[in-house]
Amino acid sequence: MGWNWQQRDWPHFTWDQALLRKAEEEFLVGSGVVLGAVKHLGDEDRNLLTVESISTEALTTSEIEGEILDRASVQSSIRKALGLATDKRRVRPAEAGVAEMMTGLYRFYQEPLEEETLWNWHRQLMKGREDLKDIGRYRRSEEPIQAVSGALYSPVVHFEGPSSKAVPKEMARFVKWFNSTAPSGPQPLPAVTRAAIAHLYFESIHPFEDGNGRIGRAISEKALAQGVGQASLTALAETILIRRKAYYAALEAANTGNEITKWLAWFAGIAIEAQRRTAARAEFLIDKTRLLDRLRNKLNERQETALLRILHEGPEGFKGGLSAGNYMKITGASAATATRDLADMVEMGALTRSGEKRYARYAAAIPLRLVSPVTIGRHGHLT
């Protein structure tokens, strides 16, 4: 049967548009929820949300590929690029490069996609790399580009891209398609559908020697932002990282044909889940600000340190809950002081408690915002 790019109908993808109608509507409604939450943030919290969103996407899109980066360094680079105050730390090329790419994606989301943009993103991502021949340009090796697993004597090929000679023509066609399907283009597509097709289309070509996954996800982010007309980064890579095994399986299944309804349905579920994760982060910041304002000048130094540590965990809270032992490690307090401090924080409404005695666990007194997986059913219903 071969790969999708070897089929006679390539790249004329087909899909069941009716199946995705409810998902597209849900995504547009969700965009309004996110925008409404952001409008309730002050400037400082809005900047914090922007930095958190960009840095989390930069870190998780790299982690999907097995590259673990330093969060503080990525955030420092992002703050510098956005003209915000930084700690002026020295940043490695890998952190600086991905931060530069993701910040540019956020700031210039509305601009048409150009091949020079892709080459520039590749240069940024590959900063400091000395093991690659083709940086800032499409791959030129005569060797086929493949995704392979298994033993050397019995390899399993999960994917193979078109020859390097075919890449320039394929990419010129891809860029033309992407811009023509934008909201202002002659053949506009709904936001989620366009983002899903763009990702699969780009990954099928696999134009670069390395970095295709990160750039492909950035293209999807650009499509989603253009679709809602808002400078934003949906928590797409963060959600894909959580569903990484299913992500690779869905891509592999879609690489052998050009009827792509199953891929679009899978991606739509991920996009909506990611959007809900973004909304949860914005709403969490609102709750956090209100809580800290209410407690201003009421907490001692130990209590404030512990509360900020809990809040640092984000919308889903401190994993497993805060125990008295955790409190002692975070603050250096004795057992008696920890017990007294925690009881005082519950009394003033800073924390909530569950369990008793040594099983007692504490959480910040704001709603937990857990985000569940989203799937698109056979008839387009969201579950």
Image (cartoon, rainbow, N blue to C red):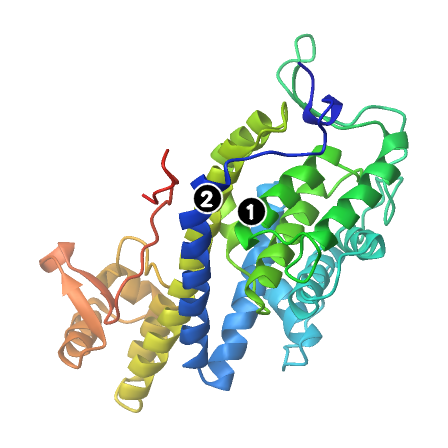
- Dividing the image into 4 quarters, which one contains the C terminus? top left
Three-letter amino acid code of the residue under disc 2: Leu
Q: In this view, does 127 lie above or below 260?
A: below
Q: Which residue lies furthest to the front in this view?
A: 186
Task: Please provide percent x and percent y for residue 99.
Answer: 68, 62
* Residue under numbered circle 1: 193
Figure disc tally: 2
Residue at left offset 14%, top offset 56%: 358
Q: Which of 337 and 44 is in front in this view?
A: 44
Using residue 365 as the reference point, say whether residue 186 is left or right of it: right
Q: How crowded is mark 2: few (under 14 residues within 10 Å), some or many (20 or more)?
A: many
- Dividing the image into 4 quarters, which one contains the N terminus? top right
Can residue 147 be seen? Answer: no
Contact check, label 1 and label 2, Cβ < 8 Å: yes
Secondary structure under tag 1 reads helix
Task: Please provide percent x and percent y for residue 112.
Answer: 75, 61
Report which quarter residue 2 is drawn in: top right
Q: Is residue 27 above or below residue 339?
A: above
Which badge, 1 or 2, comes first in the chain's sequence?
2
Using residue 111 as the reference point, say whether residue 306 is left or right of it: left
Report which quarter residue 124 is drawn in: bottom right
Three-letter amino acid code of the residue under disc 1: Thr
Secondary structure under tag 2 reads helix
> Which label was assigned to residue 183?
none
Q: Which of 226 and 374 is in front in this view?
A: 226
Task: Please provide percent x and percent y for residue 351.
Answer: 21, 72
* Residue under numbered circle 2: 20
Q: Nearer the viewer, residue 32 or 308?
A: 32
